[in-house]
Every structure is written in C-alpha cells, then in structure tokens.
Image (cartoon, rainbow, N blue to C red):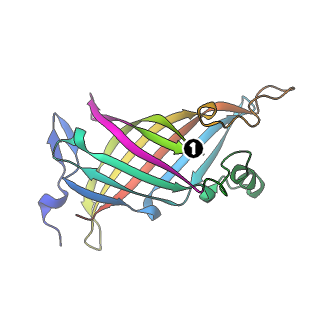
Amino acid sequence: MPEASDYTPRIVNHALVPAVGSYEVDPTHTFVTFSAQHLAIGRVRGRFGAVSGTITIADDPSASTIEAKVESASVNTLVAMRDDDLRSENYLDVAAHPTMTYRSTNISQVPGGVWQVTGDLTLLGITRPLELTAHFGGATIDPWGNVRIAVRAAGAISRRDFGLTHELLKEAGGLPVRNDISIEIDVEAVLRS
C-alpha cells in the first residue's frame, strides 16, 4: 500500500497540485471528447475511446510534462455512418494517420487553481500549438492500492489549421459544420514511479 505522501496533493503557490511522480493515463477512466456546431443551430458530439499517455509531475509543477496518444479510428459519435465518414480521407484519414499526439511544451499557473498547458498537437501529420486550460481534480488510493489523480482540461482547435476543410463551405445552406472544434478531456492517471 502506498504511503500517504505518495498521493497527498501539495500546495504550491496557493494551488493544489499532485504529488511528484510519473502517472500513466488509465484509458478506461479517461474521456477525450469533442463537439462541433452543426448547421449553425445544433452541436455534434463525439469521443475517442482509445487513449494512452503519461503525466510527469515535477517538484516545480511548471516543469511537469504531458504526452498523450489517441487512436484516430476509435472515434465514436453514436452514428455509424458519420463515424465511417470521420475515419475516411474526408476527415481523419485513419489509414494514413492512425494516431494523433499531444506533447506539452509549457505549463504555467494562473489564478484560481487553474493551469495553462501549451503543447503541440499532431493531427493528419500537421503539428500546431494547442492551449488547454486544466484543473487538478484531486488524488486518492483506489481499492486496488493504486495512487490515482484526476485532471480536467479544455481547449479548441481550428479545422483549417489541420487541413480539415471538407464541408466547411457549401454552395447552399451555409456551413454544415463550423470551423472550431471544442475539446474536453477528463483524465484519470495511475502513479507508476
């Protein structure tokens, strides 16, 4: 059983942060979701079910790092025909680009226990910066003796930045899907070292 110091969050610059260590993303308790405006009135939502990664918390939280990988083919919007289209060359082109990755490049604290995480998102072979606003959700020891942390983050990307221009412009009826894609991430990760 881990010691209390292995999972007890710390206070750094008036903010609650995880204990120092390397945490492995738990894919069964991690949700990478997205939403896009549809026909200028509604929203289409989806999830990527296959995600892996590592969160390494340093003694100085701003020196921490995040690396994540998402299997593009794991996209799920609960509509098989739409999911097949998203996997096609029109959008994610999973045959040519089976994964997307994110690597943090800077982490900084802002007031209110919020962290700004800047990193490089690689999607369709194109790398662009992605800024996430992150909140540490706490730490605990699970029933199997694992130290577990939770983090919630949100951001947005521009489809055009990654060459995802299919259906952005229609001759009639305006935009079926807007340019910006909202991203929400709920992560549980397990201390490995």
Magenta stretch contains residue 113: yes
In magenta stretch: residue 176 = no
Horizontal and vertical percent for residue 23? Answer: 30, 58
Q: Is residue 9 left or right of residue 160?
A: left
Quick one: 156 or 39, which is closer to the camera? 156
Please name the residue shown 48% across and 42% down the image. 121
Quadrant where the N terminus is found in the figure: bottom left
Total count of labels: 1
**Residue 115, quarter of the rendered image:** top left
Residue in the picture at 74% in, 37% down? 166
Rendered image quadrant of residue 38: top right
Q: Position of residue 35 (x, y in %)?
A: 60, 40
* Position of residue 80 in the picture relative to residue 70 (left or right): right
Q: Is residue 74 left or right of residue 105?
A: right
Up/down of 60 relative to 21, above or below: above
Q: Position of residue 4 (x, y in %)?
A: 13, 61
Give me the residue at 23% from left, 50% from top.
18
Task: Read off the residue under disc 1.
Answer: 34
Give the magenta part as a residue range: 98-118
Which residue is found at the position 51% from the left and 44% from the top? 122
Position of residue 47 relative to residue 35, above or below, is below
Examine the residues drawn in magenta and state their main secondary structure.
strand
Q: Amino acid at mark 1?
A: Phe
Name the residue nearer the viewer: 178 or 93.
Answer: 93
Quick one: SS at disc 1?
Answer: strand
Q: Residue furthest right?
A: 172
Q: Nearer the viewer, residue 148 or 69?
A: 69
User: In the image, residue 95 lies at what x, y percent?
Assistant: 67, 58
> Dot 1: within a 10 Å radius of its alpha carbon, few (fewer than 14), some, or many (20 or more) residues?
many
Does 192 appear above or below 67?
Answer: below
Assign the C terminus to one quadrant of the image: bottom left
